[in-house]
Image (cartoon, rainbow, N blue to C red):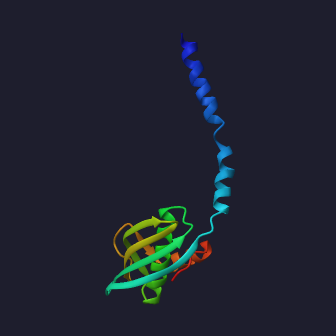
Amino acid sequence: MRPAVLFPVGLALAGLASCGPQGAPEAAAADEEFAPVYKGTETRLLDEDLVEFLIEMEGARGIPDVEAYARCAAAQYTLIRGYGFARHLRTNVAERGGVWRGDAIYTISAALPRGLQTIDAEVTVRDCREQGIPTI
């Protein structure tokens, strides 16, 4: 009886083994087709160190692309204001008819703020430029 139990497991493992590297070229092709249209950023100073960024884009692959665009805007704005760091508080994202909108709020500061979602503005702006994401 044991051979009968092992046989289906062996087939399942053989099937899984064939799934590995074959999916990678398709993922790479999907990234090559990524051509977002960054439609702009509106910045609202809510308080001395609290800023809201309203961004709009087309062609996003999902929420992370919208969040990245907002993060890039926040990093550049932080530098414009003469600060070095920002801390992400929240981002709301909505999509309608292929147009993605993000509403993000960040605090900006001269010193590294406490929290897990902090960004070094200079490093982030440089990274955004390398990725082709506009910064305000």
Tally the marks.
0
Which residue is rendered at x = 59% and y = 77% of the image?
Answer: 129
- Residue lying furthest front in this view? 97
Query: Which quadrant of the rendered structure holds the N terminus?
Result: top right
Q: Can you say whether 29 is above or below 121 in the image?
A: above
Q: Nearer the viewer, residue 44 or 84?
A: 44
Rendered location of residue 102, percent (x, y): 43, 71
**Residue 44 coordinates in the image, percent (x, y):** 37, 84
In the depicted structure, whether residue 39 falls above or below residue 94: below
- Vertically, is 70 above or below 63? below
| Residue 17 at x, y percent in the picture | 64, 35
Residue 91 screen position, x and y as percent = 39, 69
Residue found at the far left of this picture: 47
Give the residue displayed 56% in from the left and 79% down from the top.
134
Name the foreground residue: 111 vs 119.
119
**Residue at 55% across, 62% down:** 61
10 or 55, which lies in front?
55
58 sits left or right of 55 in the view: right
